[in-house]
Image (spheres, rainbow, N blue to C red):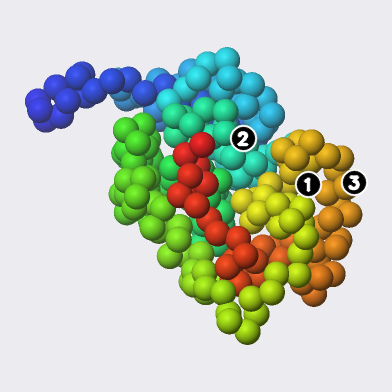
């Protein structure tokens, strides 16, 4: 017990922002964290866009982020947070656990993905781990290389290895369409793609319509899976939230 108290005193304090649209959950979480000497809640938000501004103003070490939020969902907020502040660790909180959703969250830059019924003790341990740069998935602790391998393995489990079929080597898309599809596989919205490329949202929509028609798929998710399966798009190491 004495050793634990000494470690707690010497451990650098981690600052935290809580983002959830349920005030009772936010307040309950803050009260649980307030008991820890090495953790400090410095802000709360009930909205994704407000949370981004709060992070700009306060620059916390960790953001506890609900997946379901008004105006922007948690995955969008996580991606934007990591784009602006690569050193902020994001812990996604959700009312349900889904393997595909976990994959999306980690690709968006999250450091951990937790169900909301997690015990305070486990969440506190995870916060300390991610504040030190670790990644946590299903209670497994990983470093940067470990999470990249985890993401790669799970993408391949969903789409197959990134190998180009010799009989399907022809890519039927224009260079601009391939560029847009690359952004789609990274989870960007039409608005975000338009901003990245300096074109209008309508132009992006027009290209997406063409992409779906050429690939004979129903939606952008199917288009992304097709591109990954055929090896037209590859997920690079620096796309795993390290930007």
Say which mark, if any, is on residue 190: 1
The first of marks 3 and 1 along the sequence is 1
Q: Residue furthest top?
A: 57
Identify the residue at horizontal 69%, vertical 74% (top origin).
170
Q: Is residue 89 left or right of residue 105?
A: left
- Residue sitting nearer the eye, 243 or 66: 243
Q: Is residue 132 left or right of residue 169?
A: left
Q: Which residue is mark 2?
A: 80
| Crowd tier of the residue under label 3, counting other residues whose Cα lies within 10 Å: few below 14, some 14–19, many 20 or above | few
Real-space Cα separation, disc 3 to disc 2, in angstroms: 22 Å
Q: Secondary structure at mark 3?
A: helix
The first of marks 3 and 2 along the sequence is 2
Q: In x, y percent, where is residue 18? A: 53, 29
Q: Are marks 3 and 2 in contact (CB under 8 Å)?
A: no
Q: Quadrant of the N terminus?
A: top left
Q: Quadrant of residue 79?
A: top right
Identify the residue at horizontal 19%, vertical 19% (top origin).
10
Q: Secondary structure at mark 1?
A: helix
- Against 107, residue 211 (above or below) is below
In the image, which is nearer the foreground, mark 3 or mark 2? 3
Say which mark, if any, is on residue 202: 3
């Amino acid at each position: 017990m004495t050793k634990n108290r000494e470690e707690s005193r010497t451990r650098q304090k981690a600052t935290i922002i809580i983002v959830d649209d349920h005030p009772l959950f936010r307040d309950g979480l803050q009260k649980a964290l307030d008991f820890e000497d090495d953790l400090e809640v410095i802000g709360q938000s009930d909205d994704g866009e407000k949370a981004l501004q709060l992070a700009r103003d306060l620059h916390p070490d960790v953001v506890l982020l609900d997946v379901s939020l008004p105006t922007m969902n948690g995955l969008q907020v996580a991606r934007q947070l990591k784009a602006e502040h690569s050193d902020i660790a994001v812990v996604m909180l959700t009312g349900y656990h889904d393997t595909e959703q976990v994959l999306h969250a980690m690709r968006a830059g999250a450091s951990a993905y937790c169900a909301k019924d997690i015990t305070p003790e486990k969440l506190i341990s995870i916060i300390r781990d991610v504040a030190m740069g670790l990644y946590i998935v299903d209670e497994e602790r990983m470093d940067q290389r470990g999470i990249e391998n985890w993401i790669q393995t799970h993408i391949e489990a969903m789409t197959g290895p990134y190998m180009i079929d010799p009989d399907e080597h022809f890519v039927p898309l224009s260079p601009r369409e391939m560029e847009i599809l690359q952004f789609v596989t990274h989870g960007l919205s039409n608005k975000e793609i338009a901003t990245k490329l300096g074109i209008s949202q309508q132009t992006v929509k027009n290209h997406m319509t063409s992409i779906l028609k050429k690939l004979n798929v129903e939606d952008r998710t199917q288009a992304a899976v097709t591109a990954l399966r055929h090896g037209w798009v590859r997920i690079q190491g620096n796309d795993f939230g390290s930007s």
